[in-house]
Image (cartoon, helix red, strand yellow):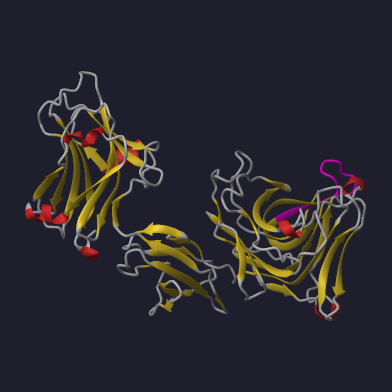
Amino acid sequence: MGLIVALSGTAQANWSETFAGGTFDLTTWKFYCYPDMAKTYIATIKVGSDGNHYLSLDESSSVEVGGSAFGTGFGSTEVFTDVRVGAVVNVTGDASRNYCGLAARTAYMIVPAGSKNPLPGIVATKTYVMHVNWEDGPANLRIDIEKVVNMSNIMRNEQALGLELPVPGLGHVRSYYAELDVLGSGPVYVTGSLYQYKGGPLVAKTATMVDTSGNDPWEDANVNDQVFTSGVSGIFGQNENPKPAGYHTTFDDVFSISDGPAAVNPSPVDGTTDVSINADLSWKEAAFATSRQLWFGRKGAMQKVDPAPAGTTFDPGILEYGQNYEWRVDEVGSSSTVTGHTWSFTTADYLSVDNFESYNNDADIESKWAHNIPGGYQYIFCETGKVHEGRKSMRLEYQNQYQPFLTEATLTFDSPQDWTIAGVKTLSLFFRGEDDNVEQRMSIKLEDSVANTSTVVHPYTYAVQSEFWRWWDIALSEFSAGGVNLTAIKKITIAIGDGTSSAQKLDDRDIMYLDDIRLCPPR
């Protein structure tokens, strides 16, 4: 086998090809196929009825008789790291069993004639690809992104994770502009987009595939967990089925540029609801970006932020409750500005104190929420079965038949919290218990930065027996009336018990589930 592409160098220069005038703008094009047995794969420049020239990748033989399953074209042997690969592609009306696509960070080998395993032809040893797929006809047009090793897709759950999705509508017998963005080296962010035309409306965009050097949720186990950090860029046509024979795919205005990938990995995540009104914005930029322009505002009314952020985070200040926001990051490089995707989120009608989603295991939650029982016992757990919202809650177990006849869970903030901002008036806690819990007092205590404390007790001792999620609203004025400075809250304690024996059985552990501690405006 001959290694055609080595990844030792990363000197980069953008390339583009228009096929104008019926000739190649680049003299560096290389075309290969796999398997290369029938010798019927060809790449030619054709001219349309409008006089426009384009590239056609064609295979006329079936894979049953040695025809290629796919054919590729690489405009250059230049190696790219952060890269945008783009092209105009066509979905042909009656064609079926067809793919075309874009490839980035590709390494490949050429297998010589006479080889049996694998067969002669090009073998992509690693690549990130975007498919434009009308295998089942244009009515079922879809796009997807894949991580490929030795020509095998090593992915799973693409549809569930948004890495494969149908293209809306049915009028697909037309041309589109396809775009594959790859940036970062650990993790790597891969996104596929389809537009009506270059610079035109977005038709479909995959979720961003985040490839780490560990085993990712979409990735087959123990295949190739390592990320791909660089490689060449190309285009391809594909048909691995024996009938109909071959493939016919066309491309125009193909390019590969290092100063092209759009910003990715937004926080808040695009489309998120219940975002804190005190949230900061953050994102990941491509290496070419030396500065950026940030656009932010209510939905439909984004404005340019001036001055622009110095880095990849931005504090928009206190946002409005229950408002839809949009934002976009345009990356500014030495030679161009790349317009980013528009992201959106909706703010919650509350401020979150703790929703317990950040804890990965019992040790995580125990490190933040400390209980008061001596002796090294475990009473606080990360719960994933019974939750109010999201995927996690806190499980508090207690044995108040033993001294001190009171079980507390205390969260200490890293710095004092101002619980008067944004017009908040209420502390809200969601909780549920079990019907066989012994009736006991439930209370919440706040402590400020100078150790003033104030405790509010739930009015019903049988609240701990509720098998359904309930919420407990407490006016913050009740705590301030008890002497606590609401502008400097240092600790919050949730307690079960009153300091006298609960009369639980000797071996009994009662359980409470706690979730979504919030600060709310008047309601």
Considering depth in this image, is 285 or 217 the residue closer to the camera?
A: 217
Asked whether residue 112 is drawn in magenta, I would say yes
301 relative position to 3: left or right: left
Q: How many marks?
A: 0
Residue 131 in sight from this viewpoint: no
Q: Position of residue 494 (x, y in %)?
A: 20, 41
Image quarter of residue 320: bottom left
Q: Position of residue 278 (x, y in %)?
A: 31, 63
356 relative position to 287: left or right: left
Q: Residue at x 34, y 41 (%)?
A: 393
Using the image, determine if residue 272 lies above or below residue 291: above
Q: Position of residue 283 (x, y in %)?
A: 46, 64
Considering depth in this image, is 398 or 358 the residue closer to the camera?
A: 398
325 relative position to 193: left or right: left
Q: Residue at x 83, y 61 (%)?
A: 94
Image quarter of residue 307: bottom left
Asked whether residue 176 is drawn in magenta, I would say no
Q: Position of residue 110 (x, y in %)?
A: 81, 52
Considering depth in this image, is 106 or 387 the residue closer to the camera?
A: 387
Give the main secondary structure of the magenta stretch: loop
- The C terminus is located in which quarter? bottom left
Image quarter of residue 302: bottom left
Using the image, determine if residue 218 lies above or below residue 416: above
Residue 432 in sight from this viewpoint: yes
- The region drawn magenta spans 107-120
